[in-house]
Image: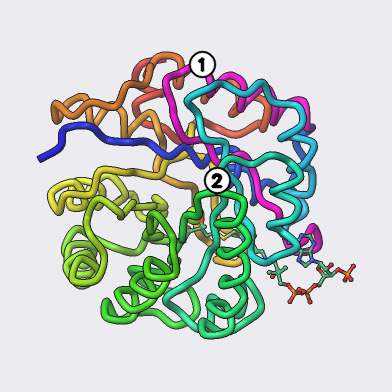
Amino acid sequence: MNDFVTIFEVGPRDGLQNEKQPLEVVDKVSLIDDLSQTGLTKIEAGSFVSPKWVPQMASTAEVFDGIQRNEGIAYTALTPNLKGFEGALAAGVDEIAIFGAASESFSQKNINCSITESIERFKPVIAAAKANKIPVRGYVSCVAGCPYEGEIEASVVARVSKTLFEMGCYEISLGDTIGIGNPKTISNMLSAVLTEVPVEKLAIHCHDTYGRALANICASLDAGVRTIDSSVAGLGGCPYAKGASGNVATEDVLDLLGGLGLNHGIDLNQIIKIGNSISNKLGRSNQSKVAIALT
Ligand code: HMG
Ligand code: MG
């Protein structure tokens, strides 16, 4: 089995989208510039979404304008519709992500349409991205449970994942949006998805609401998943999933991978410094256990 794991750093997007206090563009830019020096190859830098829905992401175009791009890093952004795609294209985004869900209620609350409508909305976005040679990632939220509906059938997660994959997403990121999964439910969900999408096309995106993210990542690694979404200092949460806390901390994932003998090519000490710095700026405590232990 492949011993290299790709870390998809979502801190500047998922980590910051839920912050109540606005963070200055210059601070977002310096966060991304610092992350660009650590060995990361994927940095989700923002979202081209409605500023009424997610005010904190309103400055994404300015952020893209300000960052020092490092060759070898894909700077990515969320685009829910064509308007978002046009913003991303103008900003020179390297890769976009569409974001759907396995829960009807979450889809309505998050992007104001049903799952079926969302698929229709994504089609022209994917076509426009293909025409511009921009890779598209597909998120599926609520893969282990929904804040509005509770349990979500693994077969629905598999169906939505298959649809996004067949539509042309190069990778499907499976989001445990509210961190409700456990190693057993995550393994069952992955078994269902793996009947439809090859393992090398999957990523796992764990929020750490119940402190189970690392256990769920271990279950995902056992299933062969080799791309992990994480957020420096464990920043994050979804504004349309009440109570959802941050993503698993990048620092904690790197430490786990090191212990398991899996390679990632990222400088843990640098990430710890960056996590401490952004936590100070936000007046938050660092959510990474490893950063606390090693600082
Ligand atoms: P809507 O209100 O149905 O959209 O929202 P609309 O097309 O009717 O447009 C309404 C207004 O928004 C118009 O402006 C549009 O121009 C504007 P107005 O005429 O009222 O002034 N608008 C836009 N502005 C900027 N960029 C755009 C855009 N589109 C429309 N792209 C919409 C539908 C999808 C836009 C809205 O629901 C939305 O922006 N939702 C985003 C919610 C979001 O970002 N959630 C967090 C990310 S998902 C997540 O965190 C989960 C994830 O991490 C995985 C996991 O953890 O599970 C990925
Ligand atoms: Mg998320």
Foreground pick, 71 / 112 = 71
Q: Is residue 34 magenta?
A: yes
Residue drawn at the location 62% of the way across and 82% of the way down: 113
Asked if 121 appears above or below 130 in the picture, the reply is below
SS category of the residue bearing label 1: loop
Question: Image quarter for residue 279?
Answer: top right
How busy is the neighbourhood of tag 2: few (under 14 within 10 Å), some, or many (20 plus)? many
Instruction: Give the answer, above or below, for where 281 lies relative to 141.
Output: above
Quarter of the image containing the N terminus?
Answer: top left
Q: Is mark 2 within 8 Å of ligand 1?
A: no
Left or right of 263: which side holds 41? right
Name which residue type carries label 2: Glu
Q: Of callouts 2 and 1, which one flags the residue occurring earlier in the amino acid sequence?
A: 1
Provide residue 243's location: percent of width, then percent of height.
53, 61
Q: Amino acid at mark 1?
A: Gln
Q: Which residue is mark 1?
A: 37
Which residue occupies 52% across, 85% down? 116
Number of on-image labels = 2
Q: Tell me residue 177's x, y (percent).
A: 45, 61
Q: How is the image coloured?
A: rainbow
Quarter assignment of residue 169: bottom left
Looking at the rendering, the stretch of residues picked out in magenta corresponds to: 25-53
